[in-house]
Image (cartoon, rainbow, N blue to C red):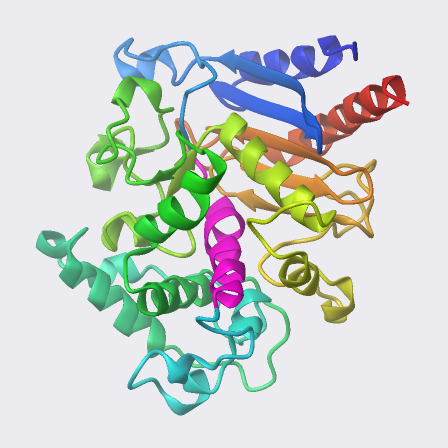
C-alpha cells in the first residue's frame, strides 16, 4: 500500500499552524480511491463557541469557484450533449435584451474567460438589505452584470461575471434553476449524495458543514451552509460561479466519471464533447483556460510540479478547495479546506497546495506501480 504518512503529516502540520481548521481529501485513479483523509475540525473553538466537530467523510465544504468546473462547465457539456445549445450559441439567442456586444458573445468565450468582462465587482452592495437572497436580489445582480462593458481587445481574464451569465443561460435552456439541473443531470446519475447547492434546504445538518469566515457586516461568523461568496449570497445561494457545497468523496466520483468519459468508457457524458472542451489546442497565448477548466500555469502550479502540465485540468476555489485531474495518469486529487476560517486574509494556502499535490501525485504513482 502507498505510504500515506507524509501527506497526513503535512495536513496535520497545516492544521496546527492555522492554515485551515480542517481538511478533507481524496486521491484516486480511474479504478477508484487510492487514499482518503479527514483532518482537523470544522472550525476553531474560540470562533464557534465550541460547536465545531471533527471533520469526517461526510462533512460538506463550501466549494466556491470549483462550482465553475464541477457544476456549470459540466452542465454546459451535458446541455450540448442534449442538443439544448452548442459552444458557439450566442448569449443573445437565449437571454433577451442584452447589450449588443454581450449578445454576440458565444458560450465558448465565456467558458474560456475571454469575454473581456472584469474579474469581479461587489454587486451585492447594490442590493438593498431587505432584498439580499431574494429573487429580486438575483435580478438586480444579473442586471448589473449585463451592464458591464467588455474590454475592446480582450485577453484571457478570469471572470466571475461570465459564469454568472452561464448559470443564467443554463437556467433558461434547462427550464429550471441550476440547483435542480445539477441534481438531475450530475448528482443523481453519479450518486453524489452530499454535493449540491443550498445544503440546508436539501436536508444537511449544520453540524455536518465546515465553518467559513467571520464577516462583521454579515453578522459575524457566517452560518454553516450559507454560501461564503457575497454575490452568490445576494443572489439567493445559487450561481454559475459559486454556491456548490460538497465532499471530497463526491468530487472523487465526479472525477472518475469524467476520466471514464475521457477514456471513452462512459455513457453519462459523450467523450467527444469532453474532448472538445478540454482540447489544449484551444488555449490562448498567455492563457491557461480550456473551456471551463484551468490548466497548470506559472513556474510552480498549485497542481504541483509533478502534475503532467500538458494533460492536467482542474479548478481552485477561494475558500481553500481544489480539484485536479491528470489525464495522462488517469488520476485525480480533491482537496477541500476552509482556509477562509476565520479570515480570508491568510494566504498560506498558496504555498500549501503545490506541496500537498506533489505528495498526492507520488501516492498515485506508487499505487499504479503496484498494480502493474
Does the magenta segment cover residue 295?
no
Instruction: Give me the residue at 71% from left, 50% from top.
Output: 262
Instruction: Give me the residue at 8% from left, 53% from top.
Output: 130
Instruction: Give me the residue at 46% from left, 50% from top.
Output: 71
Is residue 227 visible in the rendered image? The answer is yes
Q: Tell me if 187 is positioned left or right of 273 in this view.
A: left
Query: What percent of the width, then of the height, locates residue 151?
Result: 53, 81
The residue furthest front is 267
The residue furthest bottom is 100
The answer to whether residue 206 is above or below residue 138 is above
Q: Tell me if 68 is positioned left or right of 206 in this view.
A: right
The answer to whether residue 178 is above or below residue 161 is above
Q: Tell me if 34 is positioned left or right of 213 in this view.
A: right
Residue range corresponding to the magenta coloring: 62-82
What predominant SS class does the magenta segment belong to? helix
In the image, 66 versus 27, the foreground residue is: 27
Total marks drawn? 0
Is residue 65 visible in the rendered image? The answer is no
In the image, 24 versus 2, the foreground residue is: 2
Query: What percent of the width, then of the height, locates residue 370?
Result: 87, 17
The answer to whether residue 351 is above or below residue 236 is above
Q: Quadrant of residue 114?
A: bottom right
Instruction: Give me the residue at 23% from left, 50% from top.
Output: 236
Query: What percent of the width, then of the height, locates residue 169?
Result: 38, 69
Image quadrant containing the C terminus:
top right
Q: Tell me if 35 is positioned left or right of 107 in this view.
A: right
Image quadrant containing the N terminus:
top right
The answer to whether residue 319 is above or below residue 149 is above
Query: What percent of the width, then of the height, locates residue 217?
Result: 22, 41
Does the magenta segment cover residue 74?
yes
Q: Quadrant of residue 140?
A: bottom left
Amino acid at each position: 500500500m502507498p505510504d500515506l504518512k507524509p501527506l497526513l503529516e503535512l495536513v496535520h502540520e497545516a492544521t496546527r499552524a492555522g492554515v485551515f481548521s480542517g481538511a478533507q481529501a481524496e486521491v484516486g485513479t480511474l479504478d477508484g480511491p487510492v487514499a482518503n483523509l479527514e483532518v482537523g475540525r470544522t472550525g476553531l473553538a474560540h470562533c464557534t463557541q465550541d460547536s465545531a466537530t471533527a471533520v469526517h467523510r461526510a462533512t460538506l465544504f463550501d466549494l466556491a469557484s470549483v462550482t465553475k468546473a464541477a457544476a456549470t462547465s459540466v452542465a454546459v457539456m451535458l446541455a450540448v450533449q442534449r442538443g439544448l445549445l452548442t459552444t458557439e450559441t450566442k448569449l443573445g439567442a437565449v437571454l433577451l435584451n442584452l447589450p449588443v456586444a454581450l449578445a454576440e458573445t458565444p458560450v465558448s468565450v465565456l467558458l474560456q474567460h475571454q469575454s473581456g468582462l472584469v474579474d469581479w465587482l461587489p454587486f451585492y452592495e447594490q442590493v438593498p438589505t431587505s432584498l439580499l437572497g431574494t429573487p429580486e436580489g438575483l435580478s438586480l445582480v444579473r442586471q448589473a452584470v449585463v451592464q458591464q462593458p467588455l474590454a475592446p481587445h480582450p485577453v484571457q481574464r478570469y471572470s466571475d461575471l461570465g459564469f454568472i451569465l452561464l448559470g443564467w443561460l443554463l437556467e433558461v435552456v434547462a427550464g429550471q434553476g441550476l440547483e435542480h439541473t445539477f441534481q438531475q443531470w450530475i448528482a443523481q446519475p453519479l450518486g453524489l449524495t452530499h454535493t449540491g447547492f443550498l445544503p440546508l434546504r436539501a436536508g444537511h445538518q449544520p453540524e455536518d458543514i465546515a465553518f467559513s469566515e467571520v464577516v462583521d457586516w454579515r453578522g459575524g461568523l457566517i452560518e454553516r451552509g450559507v454560501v461564503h461568496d457575497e454575490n452568490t449570497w445576494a443572489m439567493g445561494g445559487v450561481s454559475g460561479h459559486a454556491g456548490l457545497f460538497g465532499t471530497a468523496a463526491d468530487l472523487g466520483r465526479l472525477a472518475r466519471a469524467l476520466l471514464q468519459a475521457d477514456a471513452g468508457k462512459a455513457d453519462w457524458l459523450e467523450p467527444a464533447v469532453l474532448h472538445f472542451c478540454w482540447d489544449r489546442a484551444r488555449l490562448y497565448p498567455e492563457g491557461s483556460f480550456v473551456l471551463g477548466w484551468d490548466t497548470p500555469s506559472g513556474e510552480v502550479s498549485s497542481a504541483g510540479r509533478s502534475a503532467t502540465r500538458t494533460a492536467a485540468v482542474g479548478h481552485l476555489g477561494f475558500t481553500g478547495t481544489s480539484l485536479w485531474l491528470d489525464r495522462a495518469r488517469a488520476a485525480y486529487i480533491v482537496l477541500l479546506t476552509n482556509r477562509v476560517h476565520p479570515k480570508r486574509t491568510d494566504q498560506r494556502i498558496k504555498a500549501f497546495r503545490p506541496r500537498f499535490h506533489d505528495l498526492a501525485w507520488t501516492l498515485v504513482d506508487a499505487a499504479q506501480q503496484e498494480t502493474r
